Amino acid sequence: MSWKAAARRDPGGYYHYRTERGSVRIFMTETLFRDMEESLGDQIGNARRFPGVLDVVITPDAHTGYGVPVGCVMATSGTLAMGPVGYDIGCGMAALRSSVARDQATPERVREFSKRVMRRVGLGAGSRGQSVTRERFEEVVRGGAEALGAHRGQAERDRIPVEDGWQVPKDSRAWRGQHQLGSLGGGNHFIELQTDGERLWVMFHTGSRGFGHGLASYYFELAMEELGLRRGEMDLGYFTPESRHWRDYKNAVAAGGNFAIANRLIIGREVARVFEEVFGEEPELVYEISHNLAQEERHPDLFDRPVWIHRKGATRALPAGHPLLAGTRWQTTGHPVLIPGSMGDTSYVLRPLPGAARSLYSVNHGCGRRMSRSAARREISQAEANRRMKELGVLVNAGGSVPIDESPACYKPAEEVVRAVTEAGLAEVETRLTPIASIKGND
């Protein structure tokens, strides 16, 4: 019998599912829940296995991840887990908005915008960006946006503190990042020209590149050795506060987050320059936010002490009046949440509501895969992928081939995923954005 039969629908718009170690709240519509991968039952159970877990939430875009689902939110009393952060530490979203009218995006300008961006931003898994000295690199991974002279106010944060005593592990592959600042990477990372129906926007998604991956791989191995895990159990690694590696991993997550912040800032500057060259105006930053982190947070309405919130493929969603927004421009409105669709689907800007407390002040980070990359390559032809994007009127990679494993058919419908959020009262829709041109690294 399917594990789903044991889950119970709550009138609040989510499911209660009791694992062997405790309950989990799954925020999905009935359609999304029915279509969810059967294998996620074990991964959801894994999220409750770590010591010190206080609560677990699954977001509507959930799909198979490392040990736990992508779309997992986990609160602990201090344990820092590997899988619930993942390899792309600090990965996240940013959005730029202009006052340029939609009709200014002529086919010629859209193609020119795409070509120029593709020349200035490194694309693909092994792509290079700016190369900096080791000393400058150390400044960036400790200072984030502040190391680049930015003090924004339109971002979740400009930097995450890193202790002076922590050093990038010399025998890790994290130093690859020294040559990758300002590069997009591959996979589901993208730069997209969009419209709200009146004005032009740009939304982009990227993370900590080889730096974050190198750090994660290094600490995954240490956790596996410390806990005596087998190779197939590596995704279930963790450090308790008593571990000699706990503090180092905490700082590594912060450093990876800072790299990702700086990487998005550099990409944003390049994209804004291209946008001004092509459309005659520099767009403004709406918001920048991460969705792969573990960070200590205070939620006095939920916990009587600070807790560590892990968000893997999940986005923080703080409504108006939340203490963590005190003193920011968002304290009376709640901050924006950026939810991308596939390259052929709607993207959204949401505004969190008080009901987000039920989801550990978190929502999904996108729409979530419904087809694996290998399955996509088996089932979708290149001609079919190219034809579908042409039918949708979206220019991909300045007219190049569409990455098959990023085709719209590989992703859940954006409207259904966002409906799970709004019907549960976690957030409300502020802006809908449709794609005009999409840029992705072909791996």
Image (cartoon, rainbow, N blue to C red):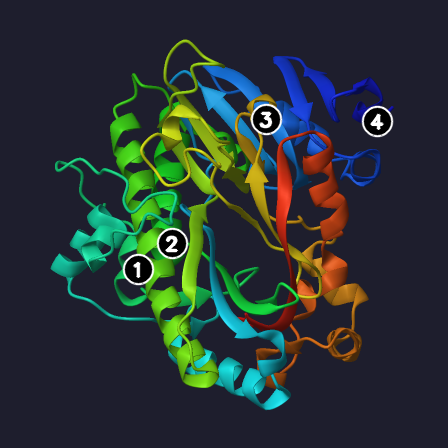
Q: How far from the left and from the top, in percent, is residue 366?
A: 61, 49
Q: Residue 2 carries which label?
A: 4
Amino acid type assigned to the residue bearing label 4 in the image:
Ser
Amino acid type assigned to the residue bearing label 1 in the image:
Gly
Q: Nearer the viewer, mark 3 or mark 4?
A: 3
Q: Are marks 4 and 2 in contact (CB under 8 Å)?
A: no
Question: Could you give the CA–CA distance between mark 4 and mark 2, rounded to whole angstroms?
Answer: 37 Å
Q: Are marks 3 and 2 in contact (CB under 8 Å)?
A: no
Amino acid type assigned to the residue bearing label 2 in the image:
Ser
Residue at the farthest right position: 1
- For residue 135, say whether it is visible: yes
Q: In which quarter of the image is residue 299?
A: top left
> Is the N terminus in the top left, top right, bottom left or bottom right quadrant?
top right
The residue pinned by badge 1 equals 177
The residue sitting at 79% across, 20% down in the picture is 11
The residue pinned by badge 2 equals 208
